[in-house]
Amino acid sequence: MRKLRSPDGPPMGTTMQKRAGVADPVLLALVALGVLLVPWFLAGPGGAVTPWVIQAGIDITMTYFAWRLATHAEMTVDGRRFWRVVVLACASCAVGDTYQAVLMIAQPGNTRISLVQTAFVVAGMATVVAATLRHPLGGAGRQRLRLWFDAATVLTGVAVFLWYFLLATELSGKQAADRWAASATAVVMLLITFGLLKLILSGTAPFTRGAGVLASLGVAGTALAAPLTTGLLGDPGPGLMTVVQLLPCVLTAFSLRLQQVRAGQLARRVDTTAGTRSSRLPYLAVISTQVLLLFSLLDGHVDLRVWGVAVGTAAITALVLGRQVAALRDNERLLGQIDEQSERFRALVQHTSDLTLVVDRESTVSYASPAAERVLGMPAAQLLGTSLFERTHPDDVPGVNALARQLAAHPGMGITTQVRWRHADGSYRWMDIVSTDLRHNPSVRGVVLNARDATEARALHDELQRQATHDVLTGLGNRVLLHQRLAEASGAVSMLLIDLDGFKEINDRYGHHAGDLVLRTVADRLTGLLGADEVAARLGGDEFAVLLPGTDVVGAATLADRIALVLAEPMTIADLELTVGASIGVSAGEPGEGDGLLREADAAMYRRKKQRKARRRETARA
């Protein structure tokens, strides 16, 4: 079923799905949970056990969302594989956080994070890292290289912030076990963020762009939110620290549910190759890193944290330079290919016998190929700005108007027609034309006409068609044309059948050449007596027929008498004065009675011939 499209917006199916996502009760519940966390832990009872219970519940919820996505009917094979890994990762995190919650309940005074919890979380997140890195990117070669440069640039920027606000402090201010646990969690979260960004930039992600960005923010927030808050506020207190640690988890769950609601959009998403869609994230990473470097140098104290930012800034600069070098090489290669293709196009157009024109909506020529001089006898530059309507034969203008309507109804489809265009010498040439409406193409913005001179072919076609419907000797129509005109006639018609008297004697005595000249003279005299809609035809030998549309039997008989008188007049043939008579039969009826009209006229003609012979015998006896 076709998607309905509003005049000024996206497909209505997509719009309705977005509205459904906004009104989804589960999404609204997650928003409410995020809002309620703030007063609960800042002004409410809070507690040390509650955050872990909430965290475990969020993990279980995300496991369910991921399972629904992995079993979605419209999900691709690669997408199902990705989401099955996410199911395992969320389940692993749920086990670890549930264990920590149970441990906190059993040991209320213990606030340290268990290595068991850290192991399950790191193991689960590591599987997601593998899934994001193994998911197909799309594109090939240089496109993938640019994608990796962009993703690495963003990753380096995130790593610099992670180092400055978390890792440098964690590695220097805690016990060894805590340092390694915090570092492992942060690194894994960083790698997940990198994998998500890579998929977002590639255009082949098994999730929508909006859901992917929210998930990236949520995952990055689990690693960066707490140290950023500490760095900005000093000691934020347990309540605020709990809020900033839980809100990214709620945001991640929100992104999974949003993707579940909008999973159908993946089936309708237009495929894009890697690198064809430019992203602003690498540029944002570069700017943010430069700003952070300036911020870290404000107090004038250079320590391990500042050196890390400096190294990261140098690395991100190197990545940008590598990306630019790759882009410059790609541009040089593309420019070379464009030049080669342009030269090939010019060579083909220069030497082709076909004329290519591009015209606008008013049929004004905006491009003409060099073949214009061979086809129309004028330089291509002389055609530019002229109207093809002025060059078209007047009889062909209605057909051109009909062609314009066809092209507008079928943009992009080639339509073939034949039109006469005026040559520079004033004559008209028949053209075989293939017209394609490419006004929607920004590189063309016009109707493309490929024209070939078909004058000789058309003349041959017309001659063959004429020979099929006309007598070669006299130029009159033949029996085929007579029946065609009968079929085209409307209303009553009359038919005359003419048989020449005395023609056989002329043929036998003076030869076939003289007989042929007599037949041509008869044809000329017949044509001179007929009107525009009346048709004379030679049926064979010395037998002729005349079709009279809209004439009754009385009018036909009157014309028959005139024809007999005119044909009986002497004719000069090769210095000989010869005469022939004409026996004419008359019939009248409807166009559908063609054969019957001929038979009736033939019978009347033979009756007339017998009557004339009988009168001659009586005259001879007398």
Image: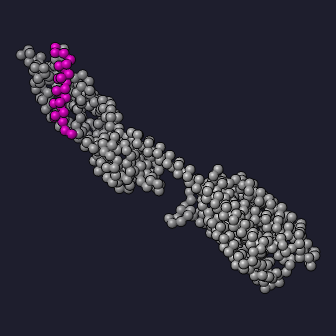
Q: Which residues are magenta?
A: 509-532
Residue drawn at x 44%, y 41% is 348
> In the drawing, does residue 268 fall left or right of residue 89?
left
Most frequent secondary structure within the magenta stretch: helix
Depth check, front residue: 162 or 105: 162
Above or below, 340 against 460 in this view is: below
Q: Residue at x 56, y 54 (%)?
A: 331
Q: Is residue 203 visible?
A: no
Q: Nearer the viewer, residue 583 or 362?
A: 362
Residue 590 is inside the magenta segment? no
Q: Where in the figure is residue 385, as x and y percent of width and height?
A: 33, 54
Residue in front for this viewpoint, 283 or 307:
307
Farthest residue to the left: give it. Answer: 622
Position of residue 129 relative to residue 306, above or below, is above
From the image, which quarter does the N terminus lie in? bottom right
Residue 238 found in image quarter: bottom right
**Residue at the (83%, 70%) spot, across then down:** 171
* Total marks in image: 0
Please indicate whether residue 185 sits to the left or right of residue 439 in the image.
right
Q: Residue at x 19, y 29 (%)?
A: 523
The part of the image, by quadrant, that contains residue 118 is bottom right
Does any portion of residue 492 appear in the rendered image?
yes
Residue 428 in the image: x percent, y percent? 28, 42
The quarter of the image holding the C terminus is top left
- Determine the residue located farthest toward the bottom in the rendered image: 43
Q: Is residue 145 left or right of residue 131?
A: left
In the picture provided, is 564 more to the left or to the right than 283? left
Q: Position of residue 302 (x, y in %)?
A: 75, 74
Q: Residue furthest right?
A: 107
